[in-house]
Amino acid sequence: MSEQRKTTADDLYFVTLTVVGWVDLFSRETYKNIIIENLKYCQINENLNIYAYVIMSNHFHLVCSRRDKDLKELLGRFKSYTSKLFLTEITTNNQESRRELLLRLFGDFAKGNKQYDKYHIWNYTDHPVALYSNSVIDSKMEYIHQNPVRAGLVTEAEYYKYSSACKDSPLEVLDL
């Protein structure tokens, strides 16, 4: 089971974090910005190295590593903290027209699970896949960058703002 597998410090991974039920939470910029700001925090304070990323409407991908520490532990804390921020934004932002729908959906996913009080936003799994060769790394980075193109959001990968393919990306990435 890859979901329970530990990661090794300093190794390079392809990671996917998904919203429960593939709910399109990140169709709003405010939620994408929560991800960006928290990834920046992790880069500065948690030894997270990001080499490629893309944020889609209901999931995001990273090619990343964590210096000297286990990546899986950080991903768990990241999901817990961002869930709280998403819920605050959903409940307090008067511009959020989907408030009742989102709270009902996330509430339904939390039912029957003792780990969650009222709401469940992120899927349990983060699918860390160790990247073991240059060809696999290149393949995953291409997959990440082409994700918005395949979804029909842009015609060229470099036009999608929330991707490392964009030169004006809000998140800095490292070169491999």
Image (tube, rainbow, N blue to C red):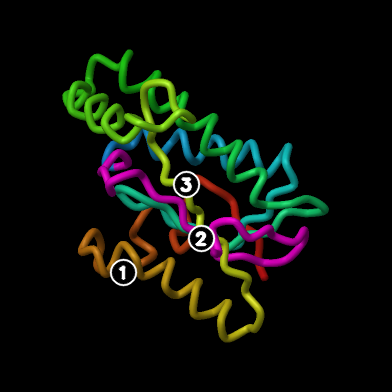
Label 1 and label 2: CA atoms lie apart by 27 Å
Q: Residue tagged by mark 1?
A: 156
Label 2 and label 3: CA atoms lie apart by 9 Å
- On the image, the x and y values in percent for residue 41 come to 64, 36
Q: Residue tagged by mark 2?
A: 127
Residue type (three-letter) at the residue carrying disc 2: His
Above or below, comparing residue 86 to residue 22 in the picture? above
- On the image, the x and y values in percent for residue 77 come to 61, 36
Residue type (three-letter) at the residue carrying disc 3: Tyr
**Residue 60 shown left or right of residue 38 in the figure:** left
Q: Residue furthest bottom?
A: 135
Q: Residue at x 54, y 64 (%)?
A: 1
Q: Which residues are magenta?
A: 1-26
Quarter containing the C terminus: bottom right
Q: Residue at x 42, y 67 (%)?
A: 145
**Residue 70 shown left or right of residue 162 in the figure:** right
Q: Residue at x 54, y 57 (%)?
A: 3
